[in-house]
Structure formats: C-alpha cells, structure tokens
Image (cartoon, rainbow, N blue to C red):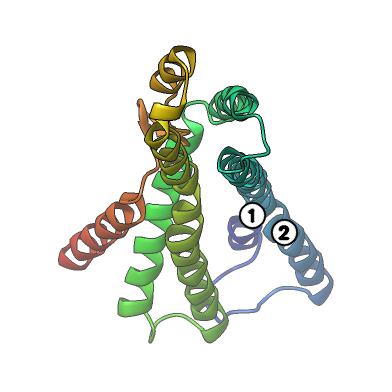
Amino acid sequence: MPPAFLTMATFPCKDWNDTSGPFLERIIQAFVAAYTGRLVPSTPVFGLIALLLAVEVQLLLLNGLKRDLGSEEYFRRMSLLQYRELQLLSRLLKNFCIDPMMQAIIGGTILLTSASLYIILTSTDQIPLPVLILFYFMAFDCFVLILFLFKRWSFPYTRSEEFIKTARQGLKKMSRWEEKYIASCSPLKVESGNDTFVDRSTSLLISRIVLDQLVTFLLL
C-alpha cells in the first residue's frame, strides 16, 4: 500500500495540511514515503536511460559508417557489411522494447502530462504549495521526455535514411552485388508498438494528444 494511502488509513486526515498523529509514527511514515518516492520513479527512469544509451550507440556507429563510406581510403564493402551488423543491434533493441513496454511509456507520459497540467490549471488554490511544486516538476519532466527523448529516439530512422540515400547516390561506382545489397537495406527504427516506430512527427503527435486530453479533462 502506498505511503499516502497508508497514512490516510492509520491517521485521521481532514485535509492536505493535516499533520495529526504521534511524531514518531509520522517520522516512520516519512521515511517509508521517501523510500517509495525514490524507488518508484527509479525503475522507469532506468529503462528510459538504457533505451537512450542503446540509441546513442546506434547513432555513434552510424556516424562512423557514414564517415567511412565517404572516405576513399576505406573499403566501401566493409562499411556496408557493418551496417548489416547495426541492423542486428536495432533488432536486439526491438526485442528489448517488447509490447506493451513502449505503449506503457507513451501512454503513461501522455496521462501524467495531461493530468499534471489539469491539476496546475484548476487546483492551485486547493492543494498546498509542496504538492503543487511536485506537479510542476512532473509536467516539466514529461515535456522534456516528449520534446527531447522521443525526438532523440527518431534519429536512428532519420540518420539511417540519410546513410542509405548517400550510399545509393554512389551506385554508378558500385558493383551489382553492392547495388542489390543497398536495395535490401532498411532504415533503423525504434519500435513504438503495434508495428509502428518513432519518427520525426512522433513528438508533435504526442503533444497534440496531450492537449486533446487536457481539453477533455477541462470540459468534464
């Protein structure tokens, strides 16, 4: 049982600012709340950081392949073969982001953002300042997640598209094997569930859904 509900169940709670109950018991409740407050966010944050690091590794390797592809001193076929290995790494990332992991991340972000904005807009005079600051931080973190993290997750797709386009522009200098090989290469993708992936418009689409949810909450 979460500490807030445990406190409400063990002590009489009249409003947000009520601090009734023995001091020692309230100290114990505070330690449990602090522990839970650190433990609960750390699990999804660890998953997001692991996913971001995997994407950053892809981008680093892809930038190196793109640089080697344009170098006259580098064996071009080796660069193309290494791109296939990069596709295998992308496949491992897809297996890591199995359903419903990405749907939970996207849906949770949308729900937390819209709910935080709704509370900030409608309940500033009903909840204490520390709780209000918590919702401000929650809304800010969710916007950072939408505008930065999801945008960063779209880079493997956009950068790999540029790599394949650059390789195809040099088809006149390549053998038939290289032409067929490049034709079989597909862009790297970060899956978002239901056979969809994160692209350039994902951040804007999630932002629009957040605003639609917020308007729905305000009209209730």
Q: Tell me the element at label 2.
A: helix
Q: CA distance from mark 1 to mark 2?
A: 6 Å
Judge from the rendering whether residue 153 lies leftward or rightward of residue 197; answer left or right.
right
Q: Amino acid at mark 2?
A: Arg
> Which sits in the foreground, 80 or 189?
80
Which class describes the residues within 10 Å of circle 1: few (<14), some (14-19), or many (20+)?
A: few
Q: Residue at x 56, y 82 (%)?
A: 17
Q: Amino acid at mark 1?
A: Pro
> Which sits in the foreground, 81 or 90?
81
Judge from the rendering whether residue 74 lies leftward or rightward of residue 12; answer left or right.
right
> Which sits in the foreground, 148 or 159?
159
Residue 107: x percent and y percent? Answer: 39, 45
Q: Quadrant of residue 183?
A: top left
Residue 111: x percent and y percent? Answer: 38, 54
Q: Residue at x 79, y 64 (%)?
A: 31
Q: Tell me the element at label 1.
A: helix
Marks 1 & 2, CB-CB < 8 Å contact? yes
Which class describes the residues within 10 Å of circle 2: few (<14), some (14-19), or many (20+)?
A: few
Q: Residue at x 48, y 19 (%)?
A: 178
Q: Residue at x 66, y 57 (%)?
A: 3
User: What quarter of the picture does the C terminus occupy?
Assistant: bottom left
Tell me the number on the disc at residue 41. 1
Q: Which residue is mark 2?
A: 38
126 up-or-down from 110: above or below: below
Residue 134: x percent and y percent? Answer: 55, 74
Judge from the rendering whether residue 64 lies leftward or rightward of residue 22; answer left or right.
left
Judge from the rendering whether residue 96 lies leftward or rightward of residue 214; answer left or right.
right
127 up-or-down from 186: above or below: below
Going by the picture, which residue comes out furthest to the right? 24
